[in-house]
Image: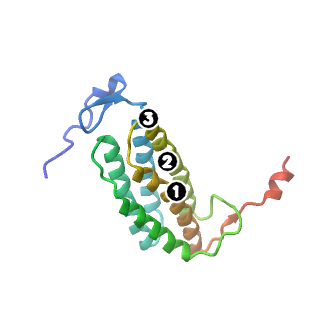
Amino acid sequence: MGYRLSKIYTRTGDDGTTGLSDGTRIDKDSLRITAIGSIDELNSLVGLICSEEIDQKSRDLLTGIQHHLFDMGGELSMPGPRLMRAESVTWLEQQLDRMNDELDPLEDFILPGGCKAAAVCHVARSICRRAERNAFGLARKEEISTVITDYLNRLSDLLFILSRYQNKIHGNNDILWQHSCSNEQK
């Protein structure tokens, strides 16, 4: 395979537009570019989780997710072709169920935190929710695959479960929300 990006800067975006994969130029603050940017940000955070001290099973799972997110961004950058498959959502659901089965049932809300890997999973979860909102915003104006929004919805759930799993394997407890504390501060 030859070099695909021989020159990183082109100056073509200096006017506030950017190019889609089909050559179309659109505004950098368009709904489509906002959605792509959120997915890119999420993928970067997933990479940050992988840089933490995590088990190989979690690392392999997250690497698979990164490939899916890259496909998702690619699909949004070239309107028309479908790169995301429904099987990816099913795979995510299977991973989510498998990991959740290893955790104690959750009986209350938890606060983001614990070990560093768990805390970064919570940040990624919140960014994933934003990416999902941005994708739905785009879907209201332009046609996109429902696989994208379904995947992001499941992924935010998985990142929540993964945060709990990281705390468990690192010997930390979930930090339970104590509603009485919020009342005392008023």
Distance from the alpha carbon under mark 2 to that under mark 3 = 15 Å
For this view, does 175 lie left or right of residue 5? Answer: right
- Residue at image location 66% in from the left, 69% down from the top: 106
Contact flag, marks 2 and 3 (Cβ < 8 Å): no
Element class at badge 2: helix
- Three-letter code, disc 2: Glu
Q: Residue 85 appears in which quarter of the rendering?
A: bottom left
Residue sitting at 54 percent across and 60 percent down? Answer: 157
Q: What residue type is labelled 1?
A: Ser
Q: Where is residue 104 in the image (x, y as percent from the top left)?
A: 63, 75
- Crowd class of label 3 (few under 14; some 14 to 19; many from 20; radius 10 Å): few
Q: Mark 1 points at which residue?
A: 156
Which of the two discs, 2 and 3, sits closer to the camera? 3
Mark sitting on residue 99:
none
Where residue 164 sits: x, y (%)? Answer: 58, 67
Tell me the residue at 61%/74% (across/down): 171
Identify residue for label 3. 141
- Vertical position of residue 65 compared to residue 75: above or below: below
**Residue contact between numbered discs 2 and 1, judged by CB atoms under 8 Å:** yes
**Which residue in the structure is indicated by mark 2?**
132
The 10 Å Cα crowd at callout 1, few under 14, some 14 to 19, many 20 or more, is many
Label 2 or label 1, whichever comes before in sequence order: 2
Q: Where is residue 142 in the image (x, y as percent from the top left)?
A: 40, 37
